[in-house]
Amino acid sequence: MSDATKRQDLALATADVVRDLLATYAGSSLEELGLPEGALAAVRPPRPEMGDLAFPCFPLAKALRKNPAQIASELAQAAPPHLAAAAAAGSIPPVAGCVAAGPYLNLTFEPGSLAGFVLGQISSGQAPYGAALPPTGRSTMVEYSAPNTNKPMHVGHVRNNLLGLSLCRILEAAGEEVIPVNLVNDRGVHITKSMLAYQKWGAGKTPESEGQKGDHFVGKLYVRFGMELAREKAALAEEAGLDPQKLDKEKDRELEDRAPLTLGARALLRKWEQGDPEVRALWERMNRWVYSGFDETYHRLGCTFRKWYFESNTYQLGKKIIDEGVTRGLFHRHPDGSIWAHLEDEGLKDKILIRSDGTSVYITQDLGTAVLKFEDFDMDRSVYVVASEQNLHFRILFRLLRQLEMPWAAGCVHLSYGMVNLPHGQGKLKSREGRTADADALLNELATIAHRKAVEGGYATEAGIDLDALADIIGQGALKMYLLQVGAEKDIQFDPDATLDFEGDTGPAVQYSHARICSIARKALAKGMLAAGDLASWALPDPFADLGTGSPVRAPAEGPWRKAPSGGAAQPAAGDAAAAAVRSAVGLRPDRADPALLVREEERRVSLELASFPAALRQAAAQLSPSPVAAHLLELTKAYARFYHACPVLRAESQELMRARLHLSLAVAATLRRGLSLLGIQAPDAM
RNA sequence: GCGCCCGUAGCUCAGCUGGAUAGAGCGUCUGCCUCCGGAGCAGAAGGUCGCGCGUUCGAAUCGCGCCGGGCGUACCA
């Protein structure tokens, strides 16, 4: 970790100082004592009156052969000169209290100085509040979304999209070069199923003629295929004198194999692989419809990709790699022509790589794609955001890449996430049964509810607010915060009603807090209590904005979300110059406010919460998980709400205090804006 | 059967590289709008952290064994 990173993180900077203190006190450093750096790290005390940061001394006890309470006590006695020196050097704020509480060394910063320290970082746009952390030199590809071209996206895809998009933003903010890519599953029998359905029941129709989004148009055909196939299977079962309701798995599969529709879809796949021009033309035509639909959904969510990979392009490379593996004796060809990898020594079953008819399977194309990715970008790390049902698949894939001695194989990571379940036993979300929680429908529903709540609650009454665009931003705020709060590995109980709740620990509550601060600042400007020149500003970076969705086909539709691209930029709501100034404000200029006045408990708590943003980002990046950022934003929001009710801003006792509190408030708004952008959530300045 | 993941308050979840009295939100109950935006604040009630054993000065956190749930274990993707 670079020194620059440490300087920008109060907990890390303080830990450094305490480690120096220990070295002086004990006569030897942690390293010399045989202890890791983490043996003396800052934690938050359980109760705020104990202090701002605490250092448990247990790990030192053994090495120093002393009671941890005694160590803490002796450290506390030796500390003041050290801490003063560090404060004088500007690496930490001045410390008002340094006491031993049993085996803990508890530090309390001078309240006003703490505020000054962190507000200074924020209002100068320092990392990670504004700019990204210093470059780590590491590049990471994040593959996410990976839709199929036979149906629209559902809630499971939404979780994937949000994890991927947020992860990209978090890693970028943490100083990595990030390459977001999408891998489209555009070949296979599931695709020819919807093609066959189109030939049978959709010929002559188009998404335009039906007034449907392209992906939905194709998805309906796929569902139709499933229904008609079930009918054929039932007929076959009755012919055989079986009850169609009571088929075992094997029999069911056998009947499916014999159904005319299945045979038709397979025939189409063979024609596709042979390059039959008519089949290819239909495939391309239907794909274009689907890509247009995806473009719209991605644009709405804020998903951007540097490159799209298509399995129809990579499966051939996969076959080549497997052939080479056979030549090298790594893989084995069976008499029937199929090719297998022997994995028994790994506790895994043998894995088929090429079917006996020479066609490719899932892992064939993934091998090809993996190689192509590294040829294209030569990155250090390749992250796959894919559902946990694929855990075994990726274990095998990575194993094969190591067997093939790909030099970059160790850099492959599967970011696995759990299922999204509906409440009331509605079961797994599957589009094949037509029982969908469709992504677009969900986004629309959330926007509608947000719209209704805004009207009912008398919100969003300021001039110039586009309520449709705003409602979509708030609805998405609710959804994104709801899904990203939960640890990735856990299955999610997706309760639409709970998501639609806009109170408590929710995205809209954070957005509201931001909007309220903007409103206060606008009022201060309007009343002349503040001049635009008092504001410190910093433009929020949006490194992925110019990538676009990368879709091969742009969507024709112009939904309300198109008026301002998703991502990180604040949504224009109130339209005048004052509003614009507030929107990019990150505090007051250093000579226009005195943070030393911020000595109340509520003010100290907000400052401390602000100071822990870098730690939340650091943890999120290390764990490849947005949830620490989400949790931090909710905490900051609550801390600010308490401050807001306890400490009047515009009606503060003095001009100076009013300015200091505005400074604090604007820094909170800037941090919320920055944090929300890491989750792909926009922060409107009025709502 | 075997493998991986999950099990914390009525519900949804934080906390898990071991550390102080296990935290939020929702829901329930009590208060708070002539006052900067009440999508808010203050407070109450609610927990043998699935069960057991172990390691440790110390376990929700680590190990082992059970129990419950999910996913996987296809010449599907």
Image (cartoon, coloured by chain):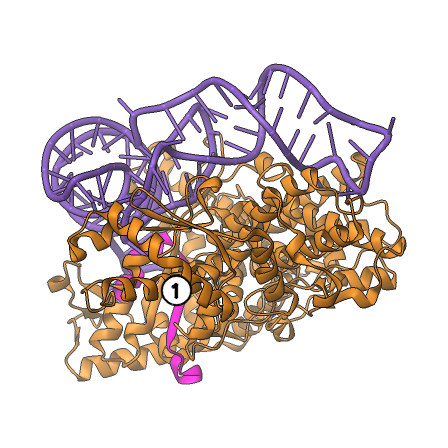
Chain label for disc 1: A
Residue A338 visible, this angle: yes
Residue drawn 64% across the image and 70% down it:
A124
Examine the structure image and report whether residue A439 is included in the region drawn in magenta: no
Q: Is residue A586 left or right of residue A653?
A: left
Query: Looking at the image, can residue A682 be seen?
Result: no
Q: Nearer the viewer, residue A579 or B41?
A: B41
Task: Give residue A611's position: percent from left, percent from top.
Answer: 53, 57
Tally of numbered discs: 1
Magenta segment boundaries in residue numbering: A374-396
Shade of chain A as shown in the rendered figure = orange
Q: Is residue A125 above or below residue A58?
A: below
Q: Position of residue A101 (x, y in %)?
A: 35, 42
Q: Nearer the viewer, residue A1 or A62?
A: A62
| Amino acid type, callout 1 | Val
Is residue A375 shown in magenta? Answer: yes
Q: Quadrant of the N terminus of chain A?
A: bottom left
Query: Percent x, y for residue A563?
Result: 77, 62
Image height of B28 relative to A78, above or below: above
- Chain B: its colour in the image is purple
Residue beneath the point at 33% across and 77% down: A318
At 23% from the left and 62% from the top, the residue drawn is A26
x, y percent for residue A100: 35, 46
Q: Dot 1, how many residues are within 10 Å of its Cα: few (below 14), some (14-19), or many (20+)?
A: some
**Would you name the residue on which mark 1 appears?**
A17
Q: Secondary structure at mark 1?
A: helix
Q: Quick one: A142 or A244, which is closer to the camera?
A: A142
**Image quarter of residue B39:** top right
Question: Residue B54 vs residue A359: left or right?
Answer: left
